[in-house]
Amino acid sequence: MSQSLSVSREFFVEAHSRAIDNCTELEDLRKVSKTLLKAWQIQAMFSEHYGAQALGIKRP
């Protein structure tokens, strides 16, 4: 499934891609990676919550 991102999301991806590209220290890359990992999991949590809510599914 290939979908296009909105301009604002493309901008966000590009800005963070540049931040990753500019990391010269391993510790900086670790911090950026952990921030993005946490943001991904928060987004997944919201998707699960609102998806279940929209479908009328009770979550444990």
Image: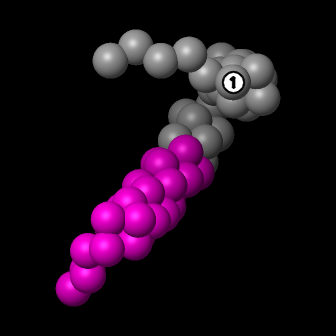
Residue range in magenta is: 35-60
Q: Residue furthest left?
A: 60
The amino acid type found where label 1 is placed reads Ser
User: Tell me, what colour scheme is on the image?
Assistant: one colour
Q: With respect to residue 53, does 9 lie above or below? A: above
Residue closest to the eye, 23 or 45: 45
Taking 16 as reference, is 38 left or right?
left
Looking at the image, residue 40 sits to the left or right of residue 27; the answer is left
Residue under the image location 26 percent in, 74 percent down: 57
Whether residue 4 is visible, yes or no, is yes
| Vertical side of 36 occupied by 56: above or below | below
Residue 56 counted in the magenta span: yes
Residue 55 on image: x %, y %: 32, 65
**Where is residue 28, by image quadrant?**
top right
> Residue 5, image x and y in percent?
61, 22
Question: For residue 50, what is the image quadrant?
Answer: bottom left
Classify mark 1: helix, strand or loop: loop
Question: Chief secondary structure of the magenta span?
Answer: helix
Q: Position of residue 46 (x, y in %)?
A: 48, 63
- Decide: is 19 above or below 49: above
Residue at numbered disc 1: 6
Q: Is residue 27 magenta?
A: no
Q: Nearer the viewer, residue 26 or 22?
A: 22
Relative image position of residue 9 (x, y in whole percent): 69, 29
